[in-house]
Image: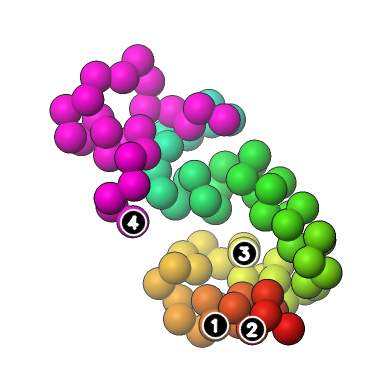
Amino acid sequence: MDRLPTRTNLIRRGVELMSPNCVMCQASEESFHHLFLDCSIAQRVWFLCLRWINVLNQVVFNVLKNPNPLKDVEASALLAVAVLV
């Protein structure tokens, strides 16, 4: 996750950028977590994808609302099961 060239990582590696903020929403620094989970644009994309594959249910919403889903193995497993079913 730390290998992705997010704006936060690029700045940390010495790349000069005008702003560390997310290119899509400008609401927060562009980190891995923000880019895939917190960004309002990314959340909309996740919502549309989940609706498209017909797994839009309460279990998925609960997992996505988890403040730290990548470290919570149980929540990640629930999301994987919900997507695969």
Element carrying mark 1 = helix
Mark sitting on residue 1: 4
Label 3 near label 2: C-beta < 8 Å?
no
Circle 4: residue type: Met
Separation of marks 3 and 1 at Cα, in angstroms: 12 Å
Element carrying mark 3 = helix
With respect to residue 40, does 1 lie above or below? below
Circle 3: residue type: Leu
Q: Residue furthest left?
A: 14
Question: Which residue was labeled with disc 3?
Answer: 64
Separation of marks 2 and 1 at Cα, in angstroms: 6 Å
- Foreground of the two, 45 or 20: 45
Separation of marks 1 and 4 at Cα, in angstroms: 19 Å
Residue 60 found in image quarter: bottom right
Where residue 62 appears, as percent x and y from the top left, is 67, 71
Circle 1: residue type: Ala
Circle 2: residue type: Val
Front position among marks 3 and 1: 1
Q: Which residues are magenta?
A: 1-24
Question: Mark 2 or 3 closer to N-term?
Answer: 3
For disc 3, the neighbor class at 10 Å (few under 14, some 14 to 19, many from 20) is: some
Mark sitting on residue 81: 2
Where residue 24 appears, as percent x and y from the top left, is 57, 30
Residue 11 covered by magenta stretch: yes
Residue 43 covered by magenta stretch: no
Label 1 near label 2: C-beta < 8 Å?
yes
Question: Which residue was labeled with disc 1?
Answer: 77
Q: Residue at x 43, y 28 (%)?
A: 21
Element carrying mark 2 = helix
Q: Residue at x 18, y 34 (%)?
A: 13
Where residue 76 appears, as percent x and y from the top left, is 52, 76
